[in-house]
Amino acid sequence: MSENFDNDKDEGRIEPERESEVKNLIKLEDGLHVGTVTLVKFRDFIAADGTKGEYVDLYIKPDECEFELKASYPHNLSEGTLLGDLVERFGTKLVPGAKVVLYKIFTSKRIKFLTTTDKNRVTGKSYANIIRESVKPLEPLE
């Protein structure tokens, strides 16, 4: 996979004859899990008050299931922020003015993390939610 990709230009595929298999609902139990970060994406957003911002999304494949979960962090990289604390847990020291490549820090890393079951406020459907502060490297850093 190229490290220079533009996710906003993904036009998808038209497959008129493709069949999709219906699967049993898989529920991820609350608690500690182990998995792999499969992808890092950057996503723009506009808040209700019109403020613009950006999120960093880590796509995580838990070992015990077929689907991926997403942990989102505001793209604010400094000491004491959610993203800053995450980067430091993965062994990168934060130095003001320095540049880091988040894709290289996280992609393909083995991690441990906690999940809880939450309900969507609109649909009422349950989903597994990663507790963002719990994402850590599986092996302790030296």
Image (cartoon, helix red, strand yellow):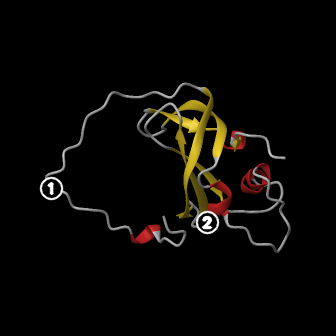
Task: Tell me which corner region of the image, top left, top right, bottom left or bottom right, holds residue 11.
Answer: bottom left
Which residue is under mark 1? 16
Q: Residue furthest front?
A: 142
Residue type at mark 2 is: Gly
Task: Give the distance between the C-alpha atoms of the residues marked 2 and 1, in whole angstroms.
Answer: 37 Å
**Disc 2 element:** strand
Which residue is under mark 2? 53
Residue plotted at (60% across, 64% down): 54
Q: Position of residue 3 (x, y in %)?
A: 55, 69
Q: Position of residue 115 (x, y in %)?
A: 60, 33
In this rendering, the answer to whether 111 lies above or below 40 is above
In this rendering, the answer to whether 53 lies above or below 70 is below
Number of the label disc, if any, that sits on residue 5: none
Q: Position of residue 121 (x, y in %)?
A: 49, 38
Describe residue 72's horizontal placement relative to residue 120 as left or right: right
Q: How many numbered dots are placed on residues in this image?
A: 2
Task: Tell me which corner region of the image, top left, top right, bottom left or bottom right, holds residue 74.
Answer: bottom right
Describe residue 139's horizontal placement relative to residue 103 as left or right: right
Pointer 2 or 1: first along the chain: 1
